[in-house]
Image: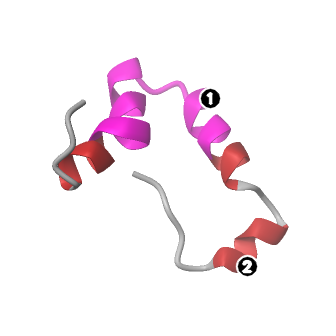
Amino acid sequence: MTGSDYPVLQDYEAYKETFAYIERLGLPRAAIDKILHHNAQALFGLRH
């Protein structure tokens, strides 16, 4: 789950690029899926 409490960073990098960076980190696919999808779904009680 990603986010920011400092939106001024949007002047330097869009959230789209932040998500792309996470994809390029070389983490296992399962970890990337948790960061970008499943952690938020679990937190909010949504099915995944």
Q: Nearer the viewer, residue 19 or 28?
A: 19
Note whether 29 is above or below 23 in the view shown. Answer: above
User: Which of the 4 image quadrants contains residue 24?
Assistant: top right
Residue 32 part of the magenta segment: yes
In the image, taking residue 13 as reference, residue 29 lies left or right, namely left
Identified at 27% across, 44% down, the residue is 41
Q: Residue furthest top?
A: 29
Q: Relative to 46, does residue 32 appear above or below in the rendering?
A: above
At 65% from the left edge and 48% from the top edge, which residue is drawn? 18
**Which of the two discs, 1 and 2, labels the residue nearer the N terminus?**
2
- Circle 1: element type: helix
Could you classify mark 1 by the number of other residues whose Cα lies within 10 Å: few (under 14), some (14-19), or many (20 or more)? few
Q: Which residue is under mark 1? A: 24
Residue at position x 16%, y 49% in the image: 45
Residue 47: mark in rendering: none
Would residue 30 appear left or right of 32 to someone viewing this image? left
**Residue 23 rendering spot, x and y as whole percentages:** 57, 30
Residue 43's x, y, as percent?
Answer: 21, 54
32 is higher (above) or lower (below) than 45? above
CA gap, disc 1 to disc 2? 24 Å
Q: Is residue 31 left or right of residue 5?
A: left
User: What is the residue that sits farthest to the left in this orientation?
Assistant: 45
As drawn, 38 above or below 12: above
Kind of residue sitting beneath label 1 = Arg
Element carrying mark 2: helix
Q: How many marks?
A: 2
Report which residue position mark 2 lands on. 8
| Quadrant location, the C terminus | top left
Front disc: 1 or 2: 2
Looking at the rendering, the stretch of residues picked out in magenta corresponds to 19-38
Snapshot colouring: secondary structure
In the image, what residue type sits under mark 2?
A: Val
